Image (spheres, coloured by chain):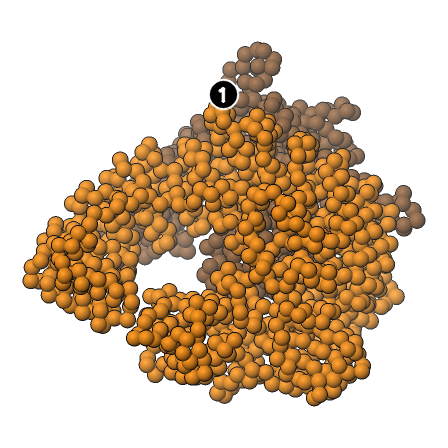
Amino acid sequence: MPVAASAIYFLNLRGDVLINRLYRDDVGGNMVDAFRTHIMQTKELGTCPVRQIGGCSFFYMRISNVYIVIVVSSNANVACAFKFVVEAVALFKSYFGGAFDEDAIRNNFVLIYELLDEIMDFGYPQNLSPEILKLYITQEGVRSPFSSKPTDRPVPNATLQVTGAVGWRREGLVYKKNEVFLDIVESVNLLMSSKGSVLRCDVTGKILMKCFLSGMPDLKLGLNDKIGLEKESQLKSRPTKSGKTIELDDVTFHQCVNLTRFNSEKTVSFVPPDGEFELMKYRITEGVNLPFRVLPTIKELGRTRMEVNVKVKSVFGAKMFALGVVIKIPVPKQTAKTSFQVTSGRAKYNASIDCLVWKIRKFPGQTEPTMSAEVELISTMAEKKSWTRPPIQMEFQVPMFTASGLRVRFLKVWEKSGYNTVEWVRYITKAGSYEIRC
Amino acid sequence: MSGHDSKYFSTTKKGEIPELKEELNSQYKDKRKDAVKKVIAAMTVGKDVSSLFTDVVNCMQTENLELKKLVYLYLINYAKSQPDLAILAVNTFVKDSQDPNPLIRALAVRTMGCIRVDKITEYLCDPLQRCLKDDDPYVRKTAAICVAKLYDINAELVEDRGFLESLKDLISDNNPMVVANAVAALAEIQENSSRPIFEITSHTLSKLLTALNECTEWGQVFILDALSRYKAADAREAENIVERVTPRLQHANCAVVLSAVKMILQQMELITSTDVVRNLCKKMAPPLVTLLSAEPEIQYVALRNINLIVQRRPTILAHEIKVFFCKYNDPIYVKMEKLEIMIKLASDRNIDQVLLEFKEYATEVDVDFVRKAVRAIGRCAIKLERAAERCISVLLELIKIKVNYVVQEAIIVIKDIFRRYPNTYESIIATLCESLDTLDEPEAKASMIWIIGEYAERIDNADELLESFLESFPEEPAQVQLQLLTATVKLFLKKPTEGPQQMIQVVLNNATVETDNPDLRDRAYIYWRLLSTDPEAAKDVVLAEKPVISDDSNQLDPSLLDELLANIATLSSVYHKPPEAFVTRVKTATPRTDDDDYPNGSDPGYSDAPSQVVDGGASPQTSSSSPYTATRQQAPPPAAPAPAAPVPDLLGDLIGLDNSAIVPVDEPADSSAPSLPILLPASTGQGLQISAQLTRQDGQIFYSMLFENNSQIPLDGFMIQFNKNTFGLAAAGPLQVPQLQAGTSARTLLPMVLFQNMSAGPPSSILQVAVKNNQQPVWYFNDKIFLHVLFTEDGRMERGSFLETWRSLPDSNEVPKDLPGIVINNAEATLDQLAASNMFFIAKRKNANQDVFYFSAKIPRGVPFLIELTTVIGNPGVKCAIKTPNPDIASLFFEALESLLKA
């Protein structure tokens, strides 16, 4: 049964109900007490996001300082429920201008009630597209027309758009300048062993799009992925142009993309929502270009001293540079004194996270700065257990670089009025979970 | 565009309600709207604003859509507590359902469906009929869901008015969202009915598959879930279906992906071509892996499902084991699930990599995770014969780190490895023995002792090692005692020298005369007799070759696995339990139902649940008198079949837990409801009779009350107050009893809270209650608190902790009591009955002709009761002794026990 929720609660960290909505009456209003006493006030909190208490099941997520709790008593669709929560939060954020927290809920409770009524009916999720909902649910409420004058409707076909096949774009948009911005954002996830061999490495990328286009445009996106190119050359019966092609392990698309067409023709074609949205997500495991290599040597000298040497090598083009590079090297809790030598950036000891933190604001390609540190430890008798070394973690951003090698080959826009469009493409690679064991 | 609604939460000190009342009746629109917002704000924080019902409803006729929505919201919350006043809203609803604005039409129908009041429901039918055929798809999609709502309230009405047919027509609607909602509604109705209502033919199938391309993401989930019940006729049809569903795997919405996977897996069972199957497996892997980059909660759901999928189709993810490697910052619940899947995917090909990972995890911080990682190494050793040696060497490395819990966990798994590969790895025993002194957990100790006993002939100082445990024999947990006993016997049989002979005497003495544990005693007597009659036979028995154990990581039963796979993405797949194991809802039996004509198997979750229907108490025939009983029956909690205790007040349980917490029902008490003791007889109460009793339902304490008005005047404005009492019981909300006309009655379930107004002084079971109404003086009466109402559901203790607690409490905390008048005729029934009141059976032993039973129970704030009952079955007289940290409430306990045993 695809029911996702019988009731939804928004609680603050103390467990007070900020707002709630009962969709079905198979769970009681006081069920949230059970959540409070059996989960929030125990150490169960955070051990498992799906729990059964009595005849009811609870799914919960924490978003900033708010717990969102869904209660059901049937064999509900949990995947649907969690996804609903994620999407609902995105929707609220888009209404509140970005923030979603306790204050935002209190300040907008009327609006939230209204939205909760609209986006779910009897436990079944309905349309959650901010684009469409904003047509008829606004902060101030839409004035209803005098019933005698039906022609006065403020949004003549809002209802058709909610339910329409293009349920994410409204009609009649006009822009003076038609522009599309594409951001290719990649996160590199790496797990490297202390010996320098790659244990796991993948890139999860997303293509974010900002559309300011008039009318109902049809868009088609071409990437340098292998399958798409092969299909294309097959269709046009000419050989693939040389150049790097990449293999996408998996892609998922925003609901605007025609999946059946993607499946048969391997083209990404869609009618975009207006404004900002995430067009697609992809994952790549083969042929990843790691932007950084980290070579640590950590020596424990007796019980009270440690020597840490870390060399970081940037392996992208010399003309490019990375920004906001942070390398966190864990040290034992009983660290007393540290001294550093760095060839670039600044390093210090951060006791609250038990790490040596080395920051390099601008990190050019093809360089290899080093840091060496001496760490003195307080010798404690109590610490019988040997120190278990957590991995070194790294943060960075490399503009104009994609770890996967993905490139946008074209973005075509068709609209019946035949206007010209300006397209902008940016690339950036960030660190996902970039871990090096030591 | 952040709002500033928080101002509505600030309250003026006193007289809030009258002030709001005045504002609601203001002549200025804006003031009225602000007032309604304040009312909603008060409702949100849990204040009772039901007394403003009439005033709020008066604001309903407005052209301001926002205001209208707020009033509707208020109605959804309070209509049930004011059913008579709710009728005032009907006219506006009906009018709104014909408004030229489709948003208002839909809003009216949507809201009416949420108001579960008979009188409103009656008026819902005509507007619903119109809206199902509305020109606007938005109205139709709302009306479709509304049919499911109405079916939940009154199934008969839905069938009589032909709504099911209209709903089926909507499947062919030209708007995809209408189709999707109609499918969702039909699927739900089908789930709750035993008649075939929504059968998917190959025609509907192809229509729905087409609609799939145009629906919203959620609509796709509804359709895929409904279609996953469809059984294809042959392999060709299955292939066709799969082909049309596979594009969904690329959807960004995880629910769509999982529902598509569910459907593909179902159809794959029919597909015979190995090529096609292999191809499908290849296609499903990437989307499943992608789910692991979603939010951790979604990852968890995905991992629980992947666990099932790899049990059925291990090839799908055979090459993807790396994606399940744990990230340092993964939440613990994700790590645990990943580990489980890693074990399942471990193979000779990848085991080296996997072992390196496990070894890494074994040095992390979280103790539970470390233990699981160590155990995982052992499970891989048992699963993969060729890798066993490597696994053992990793375990030995870990033992050398000398982290206590790692060593203990390693020893537990090594014992299993010895069982799996006898006579192969015994050379490591010496290393294990070095860690002997550090063992302090029962399971690890027991495992080590088993190893010593099993290999006594190879361990030179086996007798010394065992002897070191013997000194503490009486204090050891039962698990360790049992192993010590067996190991000593093995040692004696293998080395029948003087030392072991003395040891065996000590052990047998300890295990027979000195112990209260029946298992231990029985085993000791058997050994004793064997050893004394025929030592050779003893050897044959005790030293017999043991069957080789196998890996248990694929532990799910195939038929259960089938059922769980049919439930992918649902709770069932997360709990790894069939739906009926945790869903207490029982399918409606509509009056004209003939259960047999429904083809079996289309819904395995419910096909074998008739016993629940019977246990549910109220017969389905009562449906015409009360719509609530018709649609929901609370099955008894699984742990306590057939509760004979006077607990579940069915009517109350079904509706009483609602958001306004307490809801009266117009009808007089159902005959099947338990009769409540009369506390205020009509003769004292000027015609008002009150019966009441504390009950416990679903872990909540309620005061179940029945008001009967035998006076000549209507009574209203009921309020209740409890005096200070030992447990601080107080009402969790106001008493909500409607106006009682002369000669009518009302039942209510008042939720109670503990520790609110506690009285000082010696504990007492007296509960003083005051009830007043607008027409009569205040009535006072006394009730008795039966302690068992406070027993919590988590009162069950493990044997071990029971014994430990019993020992840890000083003897001064033991209170004995004779209950001469009680006869226990049927031990089984009594145990069930006590379990229904959360008094849990721990163990039983025989003492001469008497039976001794042990129970545990707990009252809130963690006060345990350890209970010993001694009786001769069938003869009067029960001896009871309890141990508890609070012996001063023992007398209350005995009162409760006596009433329970008498019942």
Residue B870 seen in render: yes
- Percent of width and height locating residue B321: 40, 36
Residue under the image location 23 percent in, 48 percent down: B546
- Percent of width and height locating residue A357: 40, 47
- Percent of width and height locating residue B516: 28, 71
Which image quarter holds the C terminus of chain A? Answer: top left
Viewer-nearest residue: B321 or A17: B321
**Dot 1, how many residues are within 10 Å of its Cα: few (below 14), some (14-19), or many (20+)?**
few
Question: Is B832 on the left or on the right of B471, as rendered?
Answer: right
Viewer-nearest residue: B102 or B305: B305
Viewer-nearest residue: B84 or B756: B84
Residue under the image location 65 percent in, 66 percent down: B651
Question: Is A191 on the left or on the right of B527, as rendered?
Answer: right
Question: Is B647 on the left or on the right of A384, as rendered?
Answer: right
Q: Residue furthest left?
A: B498
Residue under the image location 39 percent in, 43 percent down: B554
Q: Which chain is brown?
A: A
Tell me: residue B822, above or below residue A19: below
Q: Which chain is orange?
A: B
* Residue bearing mark 1: A244
Tell me: residue B142, above or below residue A204: below
Residue under the image location 56 percent in, 72 percent down: B646
Q: At numbered mark 1, what does the secondary structure look like: helix, strand or loop?
A: loop
- Percent of width and height locating residue B485: 20, 61
* Amino acid found under the numbered disc labelled 1: Lys
Q: Residue furthest front?
A: B874
